[in-house]
Amino acid sequence: MTRLLYSRRSLADMQELADLRSENERLKKLAVEWVDLKEERPEFKGSYLTLWTDGALETYELTHDEDLEPGWDIPLGDNLITHWADLPAPPTSQGGE
């Protein structure tokens, strides 16, 4: 009887571990990898998630080749972009489906 309980418990633990690993992989896909603007600039035109000196997070659209040059940190008032990240991929399914 003890052996049977041990086996059922082990199966439950293994399933829980598998569930946790799956959740961990899902969360890794959502993680934002911030790039310090002083170290690297975006290579392509497009939309990026940006962090500003005042702590604001905003989507910023790079529309001109000049935006990819060092002048990308042109201030918005006293505010400068300090870090940028690629936007995450859109959801593969619509809400509730």
Image (spheres, grey):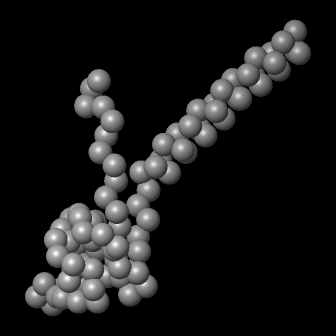
Q: Residue at x 31, y 40 (%)?
A: 91
Tell me residue 82's x, y (percent). Answer: 31, 82
Q: Quadrant of the N terminus?
A: top right
- Give the quarter of the image for residue 11: top right
* 73 horizontally vs 13: left or right: left
* 64 horizontally vs 96: left or right: left
**Which residue is situated farthest in the top direction here?**
1
Foreground of the two, 3 or 56:
56
Q: Residue at x 18, y 88 (%)?
A: 74
Q: Residue at x 58, y 32 (%)?
A: 19
Does 24 appear above or below 17?
A: below
Does 84 appear above or below 73?
A: above
- Give the quarter of the image for residue 49: bottom left
Tell me residue 22's x, y (percent). Answer: 56, 37
- Give the quarter of the image for residue 70: bottom left
State how many labels appear: 0
Q: Residue at x 77, y 25 (%)?
A: 10
**Which residue is situated farthest in the left direction here?**
77
Q: Quadrant of the C terminus?
A: top left
Tell me residue 41's x, y (percent). Answer: 35, 79
Tell me residue 14's x, y (percent). Answer: 71, 29
Can see residue 50? yes
Does 45 appear above or below 88?
A: below
Does 88 appear above or below 59?
A: above
Can see residue 80? no
